[in-house]
Every structure is written in structure tokens, then in C-alpha cells.
Image (tube, helix red, strand yellow):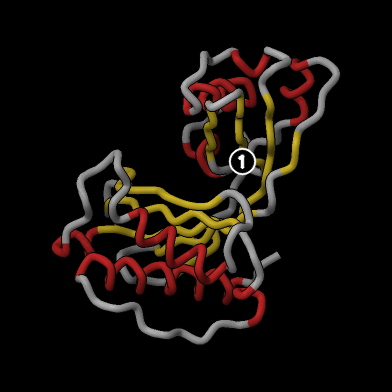
Amino acid sequence: MYEDEDGILAVRLARASIDKSVLGKPIPEIDVPDKFLEDSGAFVTLNTYPAHDLRGCIGYPEPYFPLRDALLRAAQGATRDPRFPRLRPEELDKIVVEVSLLSPPRPMKAKNPKEYLSLVKIGVHGLIVERGQFRGLLLPQVPVEYCWDAETFLGHTCMKAGLFADAWLDGKTKLYSFTGEVFSEERPRGPVTRKVLDGA
């Protein structure tokens, strides 16, 4: 569980990394509390302002790096998300920065795949779908933003993995869930607030 001040610091770290990366400058040393030195998954999302269209989203679902490093790496990656043109200096004041601080993914277990419909909690869980070399992830805020139910969320996560929407019904498909605490700038470089993810 992260405090609001942790979320503010996380967004500030991501913003500093984004600004310096785009401008080609070194990232300054920023003192962080001990919890930011513990391994944790994290994603950094860039949205245009005020339209709030996705501009980039990169992260690490697994706790491969200390949280500070995960945030800095994800922020740099979000500026050159391969789905979008590389972020330009003139865009820096036209985006809002959002960070998702993640729990480690846990395998979802069900005797019958249809049980996943009751196991997936909208506004609580993010999902990972995995089958062979195919893997897809959607953060917990995504189904809330699009008003999806559990079945739609499962289907879109499968499609994100490059699978058919109903692949979650196949016993060979592995599902993992995780939780996330989400913090975002209200406006470019503005106040940072915690996002409350209300379930559908």
C-alpha cells in the first residue's frame, strides 16, 4: 500500500525522466524513501491534454527492478512507445503523466474457465493472458475507463495478446491478475492525485 505522497513522488520521478529523456539531458539524482528501492512492477502512461488520448504506455508487470528504476525506465520507454511517434519536446507541456504501482502478478485458478467471470474484479484487477509465445496485459484502470464488464475485459486482454477474444475459455490459456495503485497529474505538471477505480 502506497501513501499519497509516494504517488506524488512516483509521478514526479516519471515526469523528470520523461523531460530529460526527450530533451537529451541526464536524469538528476533524486532522493527516494526505502520503499522505492524495493523491487516492484510499475507502468508509466502518457495521455494528451485535455483530450486524454493515449500517447504512450510502457512498464514492467513483474518486480524486476527497484521501484525507482522501474519508473525511470518505464517513463523513458513511454516517450518512444513503438505504437506512436517519438514524443517531441513541444509535446512535454501537452501531456499528463500517470503511474501505476503494481502488485506481483498471481496465477488465477479455476476448475472451469467460466469461473473467471466471478474471479475478475473490475476496478481492482489488472490482467495478463498468456499462451505459448503470446502474452497480453491490461492495467486495472482500463476496464473502468471503457465501462467493460469482466467478460469484455477478459476478451480484450486476449486480443491484446494476439489471441481470439474467447481464448480465456481454453484450458491451455494461462491467466494472471494483479492490483495497481494509480496516480496522475490533473493537468500537465499540475497537482498529482490518486485515481479511484470504481468498478463497473
Q: Residue at x 30, y 47 (%)?
A: 55
Left or right for 46, reference 107: left
Left or right for 77, reference 69: left
Q: Which quarter of the rendered picture does the N terminus lie within?
A: bottom right
- Dot 1 surroundings within 10 Å: few (below 14), some, or many (20 or more)? many
Check disc 1 and report the residue beneath it. 126
Question: Residue 169: percent from the left, percent from the top?
Answer: 68, 13
Observer-nearest of 64 and 4: 64
Picture layout, residue 38 above or below residue 129: below
Question: Residue 117: percent from the left, percent from the top?
Answer: 72, 22
Q: Residue at x 47, y 28 (%)?
A: 160
Q: Which quarter of the rendered picture does the C terminus lie within?
A: top right
Q: Residue at x 47, y 33 (%)?
A: 146
Picture layout, residue 91 above or below residue 58: below
Observer-nearest of 149 and 16: 16
Question: Residue 81: percent from the left, percent from the top?
Answer: 32, 47
Residue lying at the far front of the rendered structure:
133
Q: Residue at x 51, y 63 (%)?
A: 70
At label 1, which amino acid type do we have? Gly
Observer-nearest of 67 and 5: 67
* Mark 1, secondary structure of its residue: strand
Residue lying at the far left of the rendered structure:
90
Observer-nearest of 77 and 145: 77
Picture layout, residue 196 above or below residue 165: below
Question: Residue 9: percent from the left, percent from the top?
Answer: 50, 75
User: How many badges with numbers are in the image?
Assistant: 1
Left or right for 122, reference 92: right
Left or right for 56, reference 7: left
